[in-house]
Image (tube, rainbow, N blue to C red):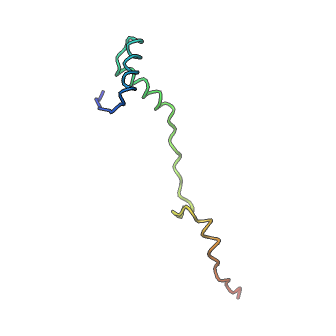
Amino acid sequence: MERTTISIPDELLERLRLMAAERRTSMAALVREALEEKARSYRPKPKSLGIGASGHTDTARRSADFRPEPRSWR
């Protein structure tokens, strides 16, 4: 297990102390439990294959401004 340091607002810290005391557990155990619950609900975004990815977010809007010259069919 690894140790880490986090910054918590005073009001939240006091609520955590009260919760830990009521449950008769340590604050570290309480924080680990909350982090486990949050991490359990995490769903990574599916990786895109990048097919057709132009890198532009305004492609549809820009396509209305640009009209290519028609090519000769001969």
Measured as percent of width and height from the top left, residue 68 is found at 63, 79
Looking at the image, which residue is at 62% across and 70% down?
63
Relative placement, left or right, of 42 versus 67 is left
Name the residue at the front extreme: 11
Looking at the image, which residue is at 68% across and 83% down?
70
Name the residue at the bottom extreme: 74
- In the displayed structure, would residue 45 be above or below residue 32? below
Relative placement, left or right, of 13 versus 39 is left
From the viewer's side, name the closer residue of 1 and 22. 22
Measured as percent of width and height from the top left, residue 17 is found at 36, 18
User: On the image, which quarter does residue 10 sit in?
Assistant: top left
From the viewer's side, name the closer residue of 43 and 22. 22
Q: Quadrant of the C terminus?
A: bottom right
Q: Quadrant of the N terminus?
A: top left
Measured as percent of width and height from the top left, residue 40 is found at 49, 30
- In the displayed structure, would residue 73 be above or below residue 41? below
From the viewer's side, name the closer residue of 44 and 23. 23
From the viewer's side, name the closer residue of 4 and 6. 6
Measured as percent of width and height from the top left, residue 50 is found at 53, 58
Looking at the image, which residue is at 57% across and 64% down?
58
